[in-house]
Amino acid sequence: MIRRGCTSPRITASSKEISPNWPVSATLMAAGPLEIMRIQMLHNTKTRRKPNIRISQSDYARLSALASTFAARNPEASDELLAEIERARVVADGWVSAGTVRMGSTVTFKPDTGDRKTVTLVYPGEADISEGKVSVLTPIGTALIGLSAGQSIMWTARDGHRHELLVLGVNHPAPENDGADRLAPASPTVAAGL
């Protein structure tokens, strides 16, 4: 029996219901309840692990507060941002590597949908897609925070479709202070030369 209008793979042992986004074959339809559940488990475990990410202590504090503030208005975006920053390795502000996406970074990436794109990651009040400024509360903004050049991540758009992007490069705005907020070197080789 095929369920109509189901958006996630769901099979029940008692009814052999299969969602429309699963390829239905004669073999699958002939499978017993335990085999169907095994296939579902295999499908669910094929999701890729998210890459390791780093964020600064100050970004962590600001983003945690932002997520809490938006929890009532936009719980889904708030939860996604909290989940992302909670899995991050939090480092001292001066030790975020130069190639890591942080707030205010301009990021060049290649999405699975085509040509490379360049955006600046900003807080919601500064977002303006016509200027290439993307809010950290958007699905792609949340996916970008903490990534480094060369890393890729799977993310889910608001329409429910899964996408992948590859970070090609990261640039940071010039520091507004006397350099106290300097970035850590991008590699241990550079650090050895200091």
Image (tube, rainbow, N blue to C red):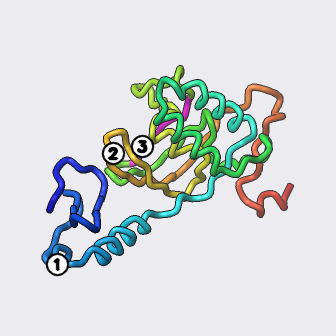
Residue at 44 percent of width and 68 percent of height: 45
The stretch in magenta equals 116-122
Res 15 quadrant in image: bottom left
Nearer to us of marks 3 and 2 is 2
- Disc 1 on helix, strand or loop? helix
Camera-near label (2 vs 1) is 1
Residue wearing tag 2: 160
Is the C terminus in the top left, top right, bottom left or bottom right quadrant? Answer: bottom right
Badge count = 3
Q: Is residue 3 magenta?
A: no
* Residue type of the residue flagged with mark 3: Lys
Q: Is residue 103 left or right of residue 50?
A: right
Report if residue 117 lies within the magenta region.
yes
Q: Amino acid at mark 2?
A: Gly
Location of residue 54 with respect to 47 vertically, above or below:
above
* Cα–Cα gap, marks 1 and 3: 46 Å
Secondary-structure class at tag 2: loop
Q: Is residue 188 left or right of residue 64?
A: right
Q: Amino acid at mark 1?
A: Ala
**Disc 3 marks which residue?**
117
Image location (x, y in percent) of residue 91:
76, 47
Q: Is residue 48 above or below residue 35?
A: above
